[in-house]
Amino acid sequence: MQKVVLQLLADNNSGVLSRISGLFSRRGYNIESITAGVTADPKYSRITIVTCGDEEIIEQIEKQVAKLEDVRDIKKLPAESSVHRELCLIKVRTAPEDRENMVSLAGIFRGSIIDVAPDSVIIEITGNQSKIDAFIGLLDGHEILELARTGIAGLSRGSENVTYLP
């Protein structure tokens, strides 16, 4: 089983995300994460899907998604030729005397404290999945009250692999 990051360009129509996720559901394919947002051209959305499967399953997913009416382009984003990032917000129970330690720990990972309450802080961290996983691992011993991850967003490196739509 291999993990694959797929990037789709699709018409920015209502229901397009539902149709794409429905295709995965109907065929029993798993979506590890999915992110979507409008592109520089508001007629189109960029959708990044992380899924896994063997070579045959990945090929089937690509073919089936490409058949959808709203999908204009689909490509794989291999780690070596693209940039992947994820955003994570983590609410950690923190006593006032431990805040300085939490600020230092977040700083090591280029994270930011974006909210402080009497008994907790919210930390914002961005990076690849392994960086975020490593940061969460270092919070062992601290009580994580809530955690929200966006899933991967990605782009291919350079300008030669850009898809231009009319």
Image (cartoon, grey):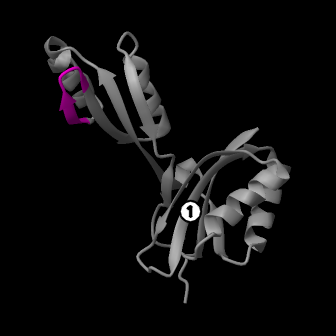
Picture coordinates of residue 153, whole percent (x, y): 48, 54
Q: Percent position (x, y) of residue 4? A: 66, 48
Residue furthest top as drawn: 141
Closer to the camera in the image, 44 or 120? 120
Closer to us: 144 or 139: 144
In terms of secondary structure, where does tag 1 sit? strand
Question: Callout 1: 10 Å neighbours few (<14), some, many (20+)?
Answer: many
Q: Against 81, is 142 above or below?
A: above
Q: Residue at horizontal 54%, vertical 76%?
A: 12
Percent from the top left, x then y, of residue 56? 85, 51
Task: Give the answer, above or below, for where 151 lies relative to 116.
Answer: below
The structure residue drawn at horizontal position 69% and vertical position 57%, both measured from the top left corner, is 21
* Quadrant housing residue 91: top left
The picture places residue 94, in percent across and down from the top left corner, at 25, 17
Residue that badge 1 annotates:
47
- Report the number of discs: 1
What stretch of residues is rendered in magenta?
A: 112-120
Q: Is residue 161 left or right of residue 137?
A: right
Q: Is residue 131 visible?
A: no
Q: Nearer the viewer, residue 102 or 13?
A: 13
Q: Quadrant of the N terminus?
A: top right
